[in-house]
Amino acid sequence: MSGLLNHCHIVNVHFPDDTIELAPTYDQVPLRHQGTDGRMALAVNGEYRHAYISLQDIAAELVSWRCSSFSDDVKTVAFIEKCLETYRNSLNTTYPNEKAYPDLHADISSFITNLLSGKAAGSSVKG
């Protein structure tokens, strides 16, 4: 969950045991349709290129934070999968502003599908 507070993002991590803590890092997906280099501001398991980040990279990154909730790879992957399913379901009930990039939902859906199927996030997205 992300909240904007005076141009400063504060992000909470919701753990499987229902505790909530401030996230140790925060980043966002590069705006692929705007001709950026496609790199995240922070590496995920050593990978900066969004298109090449996999669910396993996300899990390894979370485990590397050494938070007790993410000490088990299997539970960490299950947590990420649950989050991705939640994001996918939210695409059915949320709509971007009419001025937003027209393929925003399709891109996000593709990222989620790729991650859940064991592929890198951007493997089928052109940009």
Image (tube, rainbow, N blue to C red):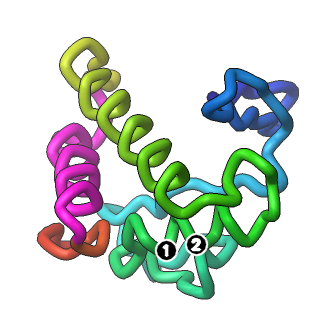
Secondary structure that dominates the magenta span: helix
Q: Residue at x 17, y 68 (%)?
A: 125
Q: Residue at x 61, y 32 (%)?
A: 16
- The location of residue 28, given as percent across then percent down, is 57, 54
Residue 101 seen by the camera = yes
Disc tally is: 2
Q: Looking at the image, is 28 positioned above or below residue 18?
A: below
Image quarter of the N terminus: top right
Residue 36 seen by the camera = no
Horizontal placement of 91 versus 63: left or right? left
Q: Nearer the viewer, residue 112 or 68?
A: 68
Residue 44 falls within the magenta-colored stretch: no
Return the residue at label 2: 60
Residue 107 falls within the magenta-colored stretch: yes
Q: Residue lying farthest bottom?
A: 46
Return the residue at label 1: 57
Q: Which mark is residue 76?
A: none
Q: Nearer the viewer, residue 95 or 92?
A: 92
- The location of residue 24, given as percent across then percent down, is 84, 54
